[in-house]
Every structure is written in C-alpha cells, then in structure tokens.
Image: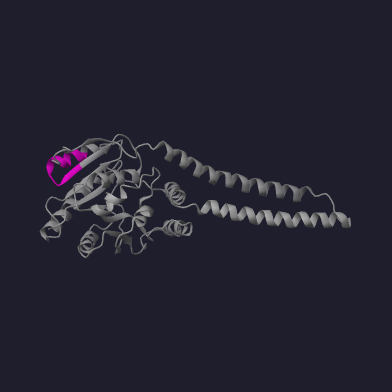
Amino acid sequence: MKPTLYIVIPCYNEEAVLPITAPLFLAKINELVSLEKISDQSRIMFVNDGSKDSTWEIIKDLAKQDEHYVGITQSRNRGHQNAVLAGLMEAKELCDITISIDCDGQDDINAMNEMVDAYADGCEVVYGVRSKRDTDTFFKRFTAESFYKLLNSMGAEVVYNHADYRLVSSRVLNEFANYKEVNIFLRGMFPLVGFKSTSVYYERNERIAGESHYPLSKMLSLAFDGITSLSIKPIRIITGFGVFVAFISLVLIIYSFVQHFLGNTMSGWTSTMIAVCFLGGIQLISLGVIGEYVGKTYMETKARPRYIISERTYDERTNN
C-alpha cells in the first residue's frame, strides 16, 4: 500500500510568503501521488503559531480551495519548535509518514522524492541536510557552522547542517510521544529515539518573501536551549574549571606562605584586584549556567502543555 504523507509546515506571520509557497507544496503532493509514491489521502498541514497577521485566514481559505490543505492554529505563539511538535503529534494518527519543513521556500521541496524513496527502503527517519552554504555571507556561514560544532562539542547529538527538514514515520512519532519534556530541541531529540535513519542532501535557496524569524539572537538562544536541554556537560566543565582554579589557588597559597617566611612579601593592590575580579566573574558565570538548569528543572516540574490547538480547518473526529 502506498503510504499517506502529511507535510507539516509551521507558520508565524507568513502572509507574504504563504500564497507563493502553498501551491508549490500542493504541486509536490500531486507529483508524488502521480508517481505512485504516496496515497492521495496525503495532506499539507499548516500550523499557525499564533500569528499576528492574516496567516490563519489564508490557511482557512486554502483549506476551502483544496482538500489537500488542512490547518490547525495554536491558542497563542509558543515558538517554532512547539509549532512543529504540535503538527507532528496531530498528524501521527492520520498518516504513515510526516515531513516537517518551513514555509519560506528555502528548503528544496524536491528532496522529498528522495526522502520518500528512503522510507520505502526501510528508513524510519530521513534528515534533510544542507550540502553547502555558498549563498550565505561569511558571517552567516561562520555562525551557523559554529552553532552545530558547539552543540556537538557540548554533548548534544545533532546532524551537522540539519535543521527541521526531515521525514519521520508514524512509528517513530508514537515512540517520540513518550518524550514529555517541556524544553524541546527537536533536531537533537530525534536522534535519541533511534530507528534506522539516513540523510538526504540538498542546496538551500534564498527566502522567497517576507523576513527571517531567526536572527543571530534567536540562533544563540536556540543553541543554548539545545545544550542545556540535552546535556549537562556545561556543569561538568564548570566543575572541572573549579577544580583547576582551586589547584592554582592552593599553589599560590603555598607560594605566599613561603615568600612570607622568607621575608619577600610586599603589598600589591593590582594583584589583589585581578584575583577578586577574576574569581568574581567566574562565580557569576557559573551561577548563571547552574541557574539556567535550575530554571529548566522548574519549568519541567510544572508539566505545562507544550501546545494548545484552539481551532482546526477540519473535523477532528472525521478528519474531514
């Protein structure tokens, strides 16, 4: 039997780009159906992440125009990762495979053909990986590559140059539903689930319209969230550095006593200030990192819902 595919597309203030890319996704669904790779019951699921513009109205209009378009909207903005999660969890009971992708047209939708072929060959997860970054500025390329290297060095298992363009089977999603944490970083969590996986490589395009919702500040925030959600290595680094500083301090204490008894000591304001500022700075940074973990633990204990779907373009009971 041909698998049913749901393309899950998170949307936040995308009124400029959605009318352009929606027909492209529909054309890809129709192409895959005509090639007999997927079932005609396949759908394009837009997830409105509390947009402030007319994104949700556009999604509802699309759903009226063609049955292959469906949409859900969250009760408020909850961030890109939670929007993707909402779509995946909504779709897992309705289909055999999902492909998550942004709606800005940057990810090559033609890579979906190879993804579906890889699923037919037995892969449960297929990662869309950017093959090169020739179109990026030096700064963008440097920060993006540093982002992945930093995550891996800190113990977060991520696929290099992979964002959130991936195929995931419903079998994997059913297991992934057991991951209950509130602080989520999907590109680092799916490798933890396991199952047979592979990668598909593609060239990324410029954004078709609208503005990027991931400036440097959000990239840094995402990186820090990924590290602290998936690894305790930063705390271990702090512990190791604390041991190192304690050892150096012990050596200096012994040296000071020796110099005192030899009569070579003299007052030094500069050395005292350097020591105080250095240790004070290290302590504040350490407290900040530890506080981040404490804060995340606090949020996890609340066990608040990660998303709330307030409206659908279809009847949840009949899927129509």
Give the percent coordinates (x, y) of residue 31.
Answer: 14, 58
Residue appearing at x 37%, y 60% in the figure: 159
Report the side of 170 relative to 182 (left or right). left
Q: Quadrant of residue 79?
A: top left
Span colored in magenta: 58-70
Residue appearing at x 37%, y 36% in the figure: 304
**Near-viewer residue (73 or 130):** 73
Location of the C terminus (image quadrant)? top left
Q: Mostly what secondary structure, the magenta segment?
A: helix
Q: Is residue 208 visible?
A: no
Residue appearing at x 33%, y 61% in the figure: 129
The magenta stretch spans residue 66: yes
Give the percent coordinates (x, y) of residue 49.
Answer: 30, 40
**Near-viewer residue (174 or 208):** 174
Give the percent coordinates (x, y) of residue 128.
Answer: 30, 59
Q: Is residue 179 visible?
A: yes
Location of the N terminus (image quadrant)? bottom left
Report the side of 42 relative to 54 (left or right). left
> Is the image coloured rainbow, by chain, by secondary structure, or in one colour?
one colour
Tally the marks: 0
Give the percent coordinates (x, y) of residue 10.
Answer: 28, 45
Residue appearing at x 73%, y 47% in the figure: 273
Report the side of 27 relative to 87 (left or right). left
**Near-viewer residue (15 or 279):** 279
In this view, 278 is above or below 145: above
Q: Quadrant of residue 106?
A: bottom left
